[in-house]
Image: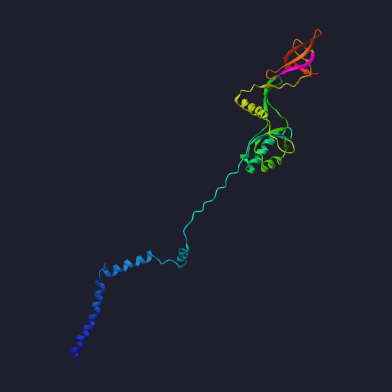
Amino acid sequence: MTAEGAAPEAAESSDAPQVETETVESAPADSPVEAEASSEEPAAEEAPAPAPARKKKEKNRGPLELIEEEEEAPAEVGEMDWYILKVQSNREKSICANLWRRVKMAGLESYFDQIMVPTEDIVEFKNGKKKITKRKLYPGYIVVHMAINDDTWFLVRETGGIGDFTGAAGRPTPMLPHEVERITKKAESEEAGEEPVKTNIRFKLGDHVRITEGTFENFEGDVEGIDETNGRVTVMINIFGRTTPVEMEHWQMEPV
């Protein structure tokens, strides 16, 4: 090979690297090649391949089902009646409160309507002062408006201070209609202020008394009548050998 032929070959070989360098340096930043590469990279980051375990879990997941719980039908309460309970004397109020507390704890409120100590308002005179107090109609007893079943009967009998229901042959006997009317009407009248207040008179018919004040002071006689509403007592005394009724205030006499 001649020297002239080698020269052009060497020139071509020396020019090749320069062409490649110029191509790389002169390529614009927003060339299609770089734009395509930049658009592919974010796509790969935005949609990562899901884990195999996740695919398997999603594949086995079934449709969601709504499960509705069936509501229990409420138990029938049954007919309610008024009953009398024998309790410890002088503890009537506390026993009523204790029975109500046990009824609520057992969730049996729907079987009980009222638990009460029947009372009436009376007037008393102490140290010359008038005072209105409540007197028990049935000392040693309370009344309950309730429905009888095994649960309620057991709960009542197991409450401290309660003896048993009043009745025959061991079975609770409801109160008579006129007894219930007396209690309920009296309670309603007292709440409305319509019930006349009675006077607490310590005497009873037939008691022998001595008059302590007034025209017939020191006379003795027997109680013939008692007016609790007005607080007056009728006494049969002997005047000039004749028995005569005299009406006086209850506090104007004393027992003999």
Question: How many numbered marks, from 0 up?
Answer: 0
Q: Position of residue 55 (x, y in %)?
A: 45, 66
Q: Position of residue 40 (x, y in %)?
A: 33, 67
| Nearest the eye: 137 or 174 | 174
**Residue stretch rendered in magenta on the structure:** 220-227
Q: Is residue 74 left or right of residue 178?
A: left
Verify whether residue 224 appears in magenta: yes
Is residue 69 placed above or below 214 in the rendered structure? below
Please indicate whether residue 124 sits to the left or right of residue 35 in the image: right
Q: Position of residue 253 (x, y in %)?
A: 76, 16
Point out the image quarter for the N terminus. bottom left
Query: At x 66% / y 36%, what residue is drawn?
Result: 97
Give the quarter of the figure containing the C terminus: top right
Choose top left, top right, bottom left or bottom right for residue 153: top right
Residue at the farthest front position: 169
Residue 194: image quadrant is: top right
Residue 231 falls in which quadrant of the image? top right
| Residue depicted at x 65% and y 35% | 81
Is 183 magenta? The answer is: no
Q: Residue furthest left?
A: 4
Residue found farthest to the bottom: 1
Using the image, determine if residue 11 lies above or below residue 255.
below
Q: Residue at x 25, y 76 (%)?
A: 21
Give percent across and percent down for residue 39: 32, 66
Where 202 sits versus 10, above or below? Answer: above
Residue sitting nearer the eye, 18 or 134: 134
